[in-house]
């Protein structure tokens, strides 16, 4: 229930219950549907919480109100005031007999997209008119759940002692080499959009903040068009001092479980809107090594040369074999970025991991190299120039603690939780190779 500035008590459709029967309420919303049966008109009002049936028997309601309601175009913004009556066949078990019916802003016709979905539309058309697409409960539900997840991540990490930070998105150097960057002009210099907060969150370990997190945009100039890549995504990143890769995997696993619990707990109706059903995953998540993954793949007829990243078809096979959540740990050092720490006794493999859900990679992380000379060696061994990492490297010379961290893709997480078929469904205004508008 909300007080509007007009001083009236406004209710959402889903807030009206038996206690309101016989009383007058005010609803604001959009015209979802108008059914004109001559002697009686039904208007379905939709607000962000659901639907209400506005019933207008010609003989009962004011003729002016009847005329307005009968003529109103779909998706117009309306304000309705009227008496609540029990009606079993209507949504939520009630109907409103209006004493006033105000068309606040009439919508044009025809609509560029049918919100009531009598005519289904392609993803591209939906995204072109995303503001209308979002009026559908099944689409809005995705973002109501994404909100629950974001809040859950933030609350969980805060409770674990992490401090939320914001690092620059306009940067002068690449995080891991220069291939996936968007260049931009920064006065007389060249700059880039940051592909990850990696370098900055590591520098903050030298500041003594010990545990930091950031939920922010990452930009990647991925040329290919896939169902799991965006050019602008949201990354949930943590970095923690005096923790190793196993420690931050524990944090990640707990954060995932907590998010599922919160969605089950607070998002039941949105899951229903979306048509998804979820189960809180069991812990601990299996941790299989990269070598074990190769063996499973070999048994299934997929030979991957040691040292290589796992291509999508291989991940599909693994996903089918293992299902659910699992970690792939101990990746070849050559397949991971320069900051991943190699095992001392076996430097060809690194203290690194990916969190998977089925075939989909959700997060990557590692314990990091914290010794200056080791880090310089590692940078050079990847064919990068340590000179371009000036501000980053300096932080390793004056007291850098051991640390570890990970980055998790928010859209991938939403996509896999809700079983969405395309990552674009998990972001309101996606950026991909073709799409820069809206
Ligand atoms: P992939 O191999 O699946 O392209 P990646 O290994 O290049 O991902 P990382 O650099 O490990 O990605 O980034 C950490 C996480 O950020 C990924 O596990 C993923 O969830 C998310 N992420 C990375 N790139 C993208 C992208 N282009 N679109 C959406 N999410 C992304
Ligand atoms: Mg990765």
Image (tube, grey):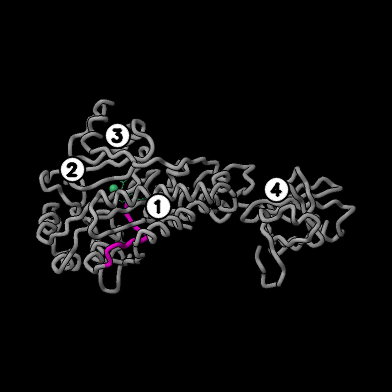
The picture places residue 167, in percent across and down from the top left corner, at: 32, 66
**Residue 107 seen in this snapshot:** no
Q: Nearer the viewer, mark 2 or mark 4?
A: 4
Q: Which residue is mark 4?
A: 92
- Res 101 label: none
Q: Secondary structure at mark 4?
A: helix
Cβ at disc 1 under 8 Å from ligand 1:
yes
Cβ at disc 2 under 8 Å from ligand 2:
no
Mark pair 2, 3: CA separation:
17 Å
Mark pair 4, 3: CA separation:
47 Å
Q: Quadrant of residue 154?
A: bottom left
Q: Secondary structure at mark 2?
A: loop
The magenta span reads: 209-222
Q: Is residue 418 left or right of residue 200?
A: right
The picture places residue 88, in percent across and down from the top left corner, at: 76, 44
Mark 1 or mark 3, which has the lower sequence index? Answer: 3
Task: Estimate how packed mark 2 is, as few (under 14), some (14 to 19) or many (20 or more) residues with alpha carbons within 10 Å.
Answer: many
- Res 314 label: 3
């Amino acid at each position: 229930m909300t007080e509007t500035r007009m001083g009236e008590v406004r209710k959402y459709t889903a807030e009206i219950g038996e206690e309101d029967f016989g009383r007058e309420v005010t609803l604001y919303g959009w015209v979802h549907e108008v059914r004109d049966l001559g002697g009686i008109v039904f208007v379905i009002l939709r607000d962000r919480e659901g639907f209400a049936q506005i019933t207008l028997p010609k003989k009962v309601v004011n003729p002016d109100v009847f005329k307005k309601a009968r003529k109103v175009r779909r998706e117009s913004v309306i304000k309705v005031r009227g008496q609540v009556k029990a009606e079993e066949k209507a949504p939520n078990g009630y109907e409103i007999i209006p004493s006033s019916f105000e068309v606040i802003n009439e919508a044009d016709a025809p609509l560029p997209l049918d919100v009531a979905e009598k005519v289904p539309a392609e993803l591209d058309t939906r995204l072109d008119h995303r503001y209308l697409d979002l009026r559908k409960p099944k689409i809005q539900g995705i973002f109501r759940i994404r909100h629950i997840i974001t809040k859950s991540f933030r609350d969980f990490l805060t409770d674990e002692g992490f401090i939320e930070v914001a690092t620059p998105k306009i940067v002068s150097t690449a995080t891991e080499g220069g291939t996936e960057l968007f260049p931009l002009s920064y006065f007389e210099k060249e700059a880039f959009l940051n592909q990850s907060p990696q370098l900055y969150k590591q520098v903050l370990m030298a500041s003594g903040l010990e545990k930091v997190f950031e939920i922010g945009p990452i930009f990647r100039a991925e040329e290919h068009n896939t169902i799991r890549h965006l050019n602008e995504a949201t990354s949930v990143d943590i970095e923690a001092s005096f923790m190793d890769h196993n420690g931050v995997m524990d944090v990640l696993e707990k954060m995932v479980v907590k998010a599922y619990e919160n969605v089950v707990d607070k998002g039941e109706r949105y899951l229903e809107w979306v048509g998804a059903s979820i189960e809180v995953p069991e812990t601990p998540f299996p941790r299989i090594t990269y070598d074990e993954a190769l063996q499973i793949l070999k048994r299934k007829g997929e030979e991957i040369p040691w040292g290589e990243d796992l291509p999508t078809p291989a991940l599909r096979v693994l996903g089918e074999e293992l299902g659910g959540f699992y970690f792939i740990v101990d990746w070849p050092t050559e397949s991971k970025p320069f900051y991943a720490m190699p095992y001392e006794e076996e430097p060809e493999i690194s203290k690194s991991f990916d969190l998977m859900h089925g075939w989909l990679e959700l997060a990557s992380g590692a314990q990091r190299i914290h010794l200056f000379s080791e880090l310089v060696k590692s940078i050079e061994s990847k064919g990068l120039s340590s000179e371009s990492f000036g501000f980053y490297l300096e932080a390793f010379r004056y007291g850098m603690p051991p640390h570890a961290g990970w980055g998790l893709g928010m859209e991938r997480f939403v996509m896999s939780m809700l079983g969405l078929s395309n990552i674009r469904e998990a972001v309101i205004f996606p950026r991909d190779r073709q799409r820069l508008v809206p």
